[in-house]
């Protein structure tokens, strides 16, 4: 005769929980309620290594910050070039005009020759052009002085040379210079503004780039921001290159005047390195707008299904709706 079995109230409750919630029982029959409660609290994060899931995106952001920092350094070198007579700064310029052997149209009576013909006429041997100012000097002394930095500066060689010529002396500059002075003024203003805005935007990009790690919704506006930043810097570099190449061509067009001109290689190297790294950083953030797992993707579980290698199985049970792996099955 079978006798009735008496079970405690706690045992009956435990059995009832196992029937209603089978996921709380592991392979060895051990109850694990902590994982189930954690999964119900935040189902997208449970079982996923958050740092490993966002590793690619985090590294891409770090590389972009390094690119922006390099771009910022070279943009600053471009902007401070030729603003004073310090050794490194004075050697960075867009254009150098050599007037030492200029042939004047007329000379004042009683002219005394000193070192160079330009110096005899009251001129300096050379003039260098920067973003904020111009510098002048003599071949045997180097740079002797620079004008005061001015915002939206533009180089007007006609005005500078006429102010320095001795009374009674005249020089015949190429006629094309007068024709392009208005164009030089507009291009110089645009170049100055684009360089300044691009530099400020680069600083903000370095500070704001880590925010892209948290959500791809942040990536879209930030990618547009970096695109505009790269556009301003690249536009400034293109304007500077085209303008000073044309300027050099016109200055040296009349060989009978014996006026020399040369582009400043260090300044153009600084400028184009800054522009190149700005574009490279922009390309990375354009890619992050659609690629790379963000922290929000992991927490919401949207991208985790595509990254099964990053899913940490608990008690052999799959996460996010996958089927349970049978014994001896190879994944």
Image: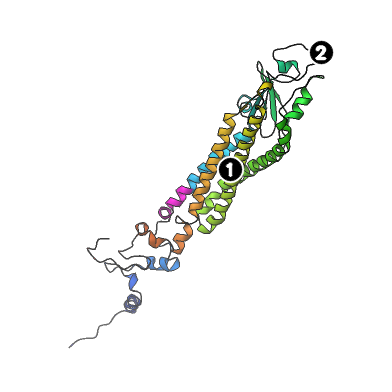
Residue of label 2: 109
Colour treatment of the image = rainbow
Q: Residues within 10 Å of mark 2 (few under 14, many from 20)?
A: few
Residue 107 point in image, percent of width and height: 78, 16
Is 222 inside the magenta-drawn segment?
A: no
Residue in front for this viewpoint, 176 or 119: 176
Is 59 inside the magenta-drawn segment?
A: yes
Q: At 64% from the left edge and 34% from the top edge, which residue is drawn? A: 246
Question: How far is disc 2 from disc 1 in space, using C-alphas?
Answer: 51 Å
The answer to whether any part of residue 52 appears in the image is: yes
Is residue 66 shown above or below 101?
below
Quarter placement of the C terminus: bottom left
Which residue is outermost to the left? Answer: 1
Residue of label 1: 234
The answer to whether any part of residue 215 appears in the image is: no
Magenta residues, as a range? 47-60
């Amino acid at each position: 005769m079978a006798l009735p079995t008496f079970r405690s109230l706690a045992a009956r409750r435990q059995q009832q929980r196992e029937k209603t919630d089978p996921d709380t029982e592991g392979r060895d029959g051990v109850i694990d309620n902590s994982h189930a409660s954690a999964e119900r609290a935040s189902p997208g994060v449970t079982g996923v290594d958050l740092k490993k899931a966002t590793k690619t995106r985090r590294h891409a952001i770090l590389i972009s910050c390094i690119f922006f920092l390099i771009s910022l350094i070279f943009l600053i070198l471009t902007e401070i070039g030729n603003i004073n007579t310090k050794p490194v700064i004075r050697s960075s310029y867009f254009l150098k005009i050599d007037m030492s052997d200029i042939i004047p149209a007329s000379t004042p009576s009683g002219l005394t020759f000193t070192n160079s013909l330009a110096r005899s006429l009251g001129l300096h041997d050379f003039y260098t052009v920067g973003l904020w100012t111009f510098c002048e000097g003599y071949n045997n002394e180097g740079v002797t002085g620079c004008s005061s930095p001015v915002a939206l500066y533009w180089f007007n060689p006609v005005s500078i040379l006429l102010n320095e010529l001795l009374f009674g002396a005249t020089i015949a500059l190429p006629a094309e210079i007068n024709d392009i002075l208005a164009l030089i003024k507009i291009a110089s203003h645009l170049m100055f503004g684009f360089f300044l805005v691009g530099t400020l935007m680069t600083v903000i990009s370095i500070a704001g780039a880590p925010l892209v790690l948290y959500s791809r919704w942040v990536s879209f506006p930030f990618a547009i921001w970096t695109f505009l930043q790269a556009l301003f810097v690249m536009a400034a570099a293109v304007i500077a290159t085209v303008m000073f190449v044309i300027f050099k061509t016109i200055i040296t067009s009349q060989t009978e005047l014996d006026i020399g001109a040369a582009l400043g290689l260090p300044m153009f190297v600084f400028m184009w390195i800054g522009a190149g790294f700005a574009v490279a950083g922009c390309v990375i953030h354009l890619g992050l707008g659609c690629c790379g797992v963000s922290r929000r993707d992991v927490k919401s579980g949207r991208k985790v299904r595509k990254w099964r290698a990053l899913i940490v199985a608990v008690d052999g049970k799959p996460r996010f709706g996958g089927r349970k792996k049978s014994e001896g099955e190879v994944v």
